[in-house]
Image (cartoon, grey):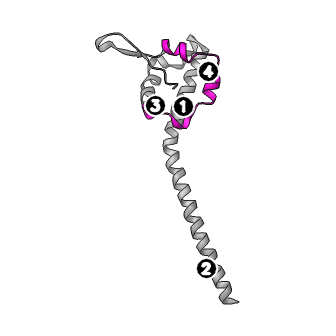
């Protein structure tokens, strides 16, 4: 979420990405809460979301395991899940927002034509 590069663990087919060790040094700092609250959730790179999905769906990311390990880790995990869910929700909402904006603009244009026609009618009637 914060652009920390993972370190590669293992060899051959057993290679995995380990974010924990690098993140402890770069992310787990005194300003973590501030970084989370000011995080730009509307501009999460799609590649980050796709990389997070298998991680948050893994057995190691289970709430019970994380809570037993550390309340801080559990809280951060909940925040990460929320960011991924927000991103998924916005994929549905953004197109609807665009449609609504377009409909409002169209409605405003139609209302302007209506008002203009009504003024002409009033002049003709007068």
At 49% from the left and 11% from the top, the residue drawn is 21
Report which residue position mark 1 lands on: 83
Please tell me in which quadrant of the rendered image residue 123 appears: bottom right
Disc 3 packing (10 Å; few <14; some 14–19; many ≥20):
some
Report which residue position mark 4 lands on: 32
At 64% from the left and 20% from the top, the residue drawn is 31
At 63% from the left and 83% from the top, the residue drawn is 120
Between the residue at mark 1 and the residue at mark 3, the CA separation in whole angstroms equals 9 Å
* Mark in the foreground, 2 or 1: 2
Which of marks 3 and 1 precedes in the sequence? 3
Disc 4 packing (10 Å; few <14; some 14–19; many ≥20):
few
Region in magenta? 21-47
Report which residue position mark 3 lands on: 49
Residue 24 magenta: yes
Q: Quadrant of the C terminus?
A: bottom right
Disc 2 packing (10 Å; few <14; some 14–19; many ≥20):
few
């Amino acid at each position: 979420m914060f652009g920390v590069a993972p370190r590669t663990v293992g060899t051959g087919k057993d290679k995995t990405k380990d974010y924990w060790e690098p993140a402890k040094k770069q992310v787990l700092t005194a300003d973590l809460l501030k970084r989370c609250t000011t995080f730009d959730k509307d501009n999460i790179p799609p590649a980050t979301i796709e990389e997070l999905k298998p991680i948050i769906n893994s057995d190691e990311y289970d709430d019970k395991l994380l809570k037993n390990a550390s309340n801080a880790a559990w809280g951060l995990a909940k925040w990460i899940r929320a960011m991924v869910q927000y991103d998924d929700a916005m994929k549905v909402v953004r197109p609807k927002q665009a449609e609504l904006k377009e409909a409002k603009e169209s409605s405003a244009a139609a209302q302007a034509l209506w008002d203009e026609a009504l003024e002409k009618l009033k002049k003709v009637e007068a």
